[in-house]
Image (cartoon, rainbow, N blue to C red):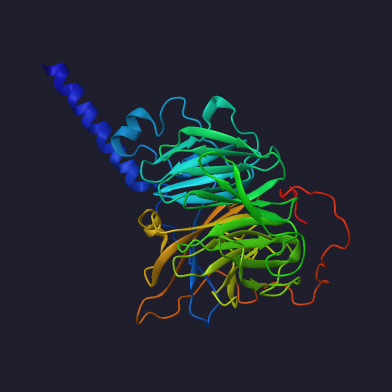
Amino acid sequence: MRNAAHTFLRLAALGSMALALAACQRVPGTARDAKPVFYPLPPDPPRIQYLTSINTAWDVVPERRGLAGFLLGPREPGARNRALVKPYGIAVWNGRIYVCDQRGGDVEVFDLIKGDHHSLSGASGLMKSPTNLCVDPEGYKFIVESMRGVIHAFDPQDAHVASFKLKEGRPGGIASVGKELFVTDVTGDRILVLDRATGNVLRTFGSKGKEPGQFIMPNAIAADAAGDLYISDQMNFRLQKLDREGKPLLVTGKAGDAYGTFARPRGVAVGPDGTIYVVESVFEIVQMFNQEGKVLMGFGNYHGAPGFLELPAGVAVDTSCLKHFARYVDPRFEPQYLVFVASQVGAARIGVYAFGHLKQGAETPATTIPKAAPRPPEASQPAPKPPEGPQPAPTPEPPSSRP
């Protein structure tokens, strides 16, 4: 009886010690003490706040805390921390973040609801170098492997259901609208429309050229709630909006190094408010446009500030994850939705940003971005020129080092 009492007291002491240690330590994943990072700079009111970054599985998978963590350790025995190597395409659905890791050879899934991580194809070796992906409203995933010319389909539970091999062309980006998939053909300068159940080509639209509705190396593609398509027309240095039959609705951008122009447009996404987000890889910035094609602002290009972009590629918007990042939001800021940006190198492989506005009556807060933070150079180097004559068929994958 006395031994049992001593054992109980020892366990109670250990528990108290564990709780004290936990109280003294900074818990991973809690809000940071640093000043917020806002875009644009004061005195303009902030519209974008940088929240945090995701680089490894352990940025999402919580540690054991308190007595359980003290007695059993912070992680499951044999748990491995999967780090993102070279993320490119990104999509978010129902609390899950899907990232195409080109060098990692799989699509990494960060489940914020379960606090879990897994790879989409697991140990099957199904994918070699996934490039881009999309998720439809029901949760079906479609992943492009550009170099192999293959599209993989996964169901809402992340189980593989089919793979389609394209007979010609090189797929770049992909979007799902209804029962059809819209795929950019990087080498064919057109859009392929596929039956999502069979992978058969139903029709195509577009051709090589500079007129509205024509393309030179179309890259990423996204669809809005109405089913209209947004395409980064890479070597025409512009963004195009088309309907599902290929009718041009909007063309904006040209070759250049100022806001509203492009040197290498990559990922594209459309917010629930209609704001268009386009990744500019060379100048490492995400530019925001309205539905009339007017550039609104940019973010992520302040080198040295937390979360700055390095060789950014993919972008996605989402509302399902807002509560999971609420602890990072400045109390004076009202977020409307999240913006996720994939960078191929750097300290923030997946940058998480909130789009929103200051709460009523709140003063413009200070920011960690220096007042002299650089903007895209206006005339520091000549603007890139469109290619002349026949061009070799390049891969949509950008170089592994900065241009």
The residue that appears at 74% across and 73% down in the rendered structure is 377
**Relative image position of residue 80 (x, y in whole percent):** 50, 31
**Relative image position of residue 291 (x, y in whole percent):** 54, 74
**Relative image position of residue 208 (x, y in whole percent):** 77, 60
The residue that appears at 40% across and 34% down in the rendered structure is 74
Q: Is residue 140 left or right of residue 163?
A: left
Q: Is residue 369 left or right of residue 211?
A: left
Q: Quadrant of the C terminus?
A: bottom right
The answer to whether residue 333 is visible is yes
**Relative image position of residue 95 (x, y in whole percent):** 40, 49
The answer to whether residue 346 is visible is no
Q: Is residue 360 left or right of residue 312?
A: left
Q: Nearer the viewer, residue 25 or 146?
A: 146
In the rendered image of this protein, does residue 248 appear above or below residue 14?
Answer: below
Q: Residue furthest front?
A: 202
The residue that appears at 40% across and 54% down in the rendered structure is 321
Q: Nearer the viewer, residue 70 or 28?
A: 28
In the rendered image of this protein, does residue 326 appear above or below residue 183?
Answer: below
Q: Nearer the viewer, residue 145 or 191?
A: 191
